[in-house]
Image (spheres, rainbow, N blue to C red):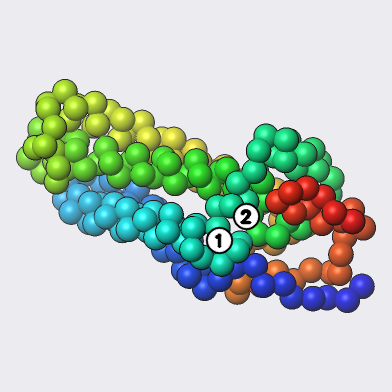
Amino acid sequence: MTKQNEQIWDPALRAFHWALAVAVIGGWLLGQFGPLQMTLHFWAGYAVAALIVFRLLWGVVGPRNARFTSFLRGPGTVIAYVRTLPARTSVHPKGHNPLGGWSIVAMLAVLAAQVATGLILDPEDYINTGPLAGMVSADWNRWALGMHHTLAVVLLALVVLHVAAILFYRFWKREDLVTPMITGQRRQAGRSRKGRFTAHGRTG
């Protein structure tokens, strides 16, 4: 069976992915070490906000595989894809699979909420106060503080699920998801006898 390379990720999307990983992990770690690191924590949050804006724009004007319209599908398509997961062989969706597409939306939504609450929280320690905290009431300040901590746990859970999915695809589905996000290309052995799963369903 002949090997072939398939271009699936553009350079801008790959740069976004790794920059977001660094900003999120760095920001989360900095947030655990107390007030002396909070300036860097806030800058990590600003970086995340800028990256989210880029991803939303790139999801509209970027290459096909980067666009939301190429991977956000309805429940029927998602369920059909989920049914293929027990099979050991990969069905090689072009770009994000239907389930992974919605996980991206969940991650972006949680990150956006995390940034928003970080901007207005006020723990009343005169150090960790968000830059926009003075624009809302004290009740909103306290709500944002609690929600910011809650969302940090949710975000950690999503990151763990993301890593677990990578390991699942690597060892169960025999598909490397990391290398294509570095090189932009996926190396595959011809076409699987089970066919190819596109955003619209299975072919072949």
The span from disc 2 to disc 1 (Cα, nearest Å) is: 7 Å
User: Which amino acid type is shown beneath numbered disc 2?
Assistant: Ser
Position of residue 131 measured from the top left corner of the image (x, y, whole percent): 14, 46
Q: Describe the element under mark 1 as helix, strand or loop.
A: helix
Name which residue lies at 61% across and 72% down. 184
- Reply above or below: 33 against 51: above
- Reply above or below: 146 against 83: above
Name which residue lies at 70% across and 39% down. 78
Does residue 20 show up?
no
Name which residue lies at 39% across and 60% down. 54
Residue closest to the far top? 139
Q: In the image shown, does 103 or 30 lie closer to the viewer? A: 103
Name which residue lies at 35% across and 47% down. 28
How many numbered callouts? 2
Proximity of marks 2 and 1: CB atoms separated by less than 8 Å: yes
Q: Which mark is residue 66?
A: 1
Residue for badge 2: 70
Position of residue 166 measured from the top left corner of the image (x, y, whole percent): 64, 52
Image quarter in which the C terminus is found: bottom right
Q: Does 176 sit left or right of 147 as displayed? A: right
